[in-house]
Image (tube, rainbow, N blue to C red):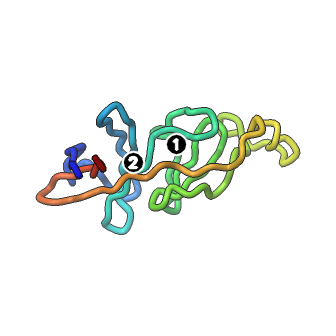
Amino acid sequence: MTTIAVATSSQVKEGEILPVKFENKKAILSRIDGKVYAVENKCPHLGMPLAKGKVCNNAITCRWHGATFDLKTGKNVKWVDSFLGVALPEASHQLLSLGKPAQGLKTFTVKEENDDISILIHT
């Protein structure tokens, strides 16, 4: 197993997100209740970046189509239901999802030590 330094502890603020890149991957880091978590920075709906999404209640909502994901587990909390932040009627949600089923985000194992935050890579 390899660790890759991606940020310092002071860069990851409670309840906010920090986009990072490592090994041709993009992730977002978030500190929740003092612990740092990492999920991929790509919404599984259409692959749009999550880094500009809204964080609320330990989850991030994609600004493009409203899908919401738990930042600790990557699990999908709510599938697509809006367009650019404008809520759409429930009857249009299936059409907006383009037939894609709800999916979660890939998570990464994080290690925080000596003011460094690293992602663990399984080799």
* Disc 2 residue type (three-letter): Ile
Towards the viewer: 53 or 45: 45
* Disc 1 residue type (three-letter): Gly
Query: Percent position (x, y) of residue 48?
Result: 55, 32
Residue that numbered label 2 is attached to: 17
Residue 115 sits in quarter: bottom left
Residue sitting at the far right: 91
Query: Percent position (x, y) of residue 7?
Result: 23, 45
Query: Percent position (x, y) of residue 100?
Result: 72, 41
Towards the viewer: 50 or 38: 38
Residue sitting at the far front: 123
Query: Percent position (x, y) of residue 17?
Result: 39, 48
Residue that numbered label 1 is attached to: 53
Tell me which residue sits at (65%, 34%) in the image. Answer: 84
Q: Describe the element under mark 2 as helix, strand or loop.
A: strand
* Contact? badges 2 and 1 (CB < 8 Å): yes
Residue 88 sits in quarter: top right
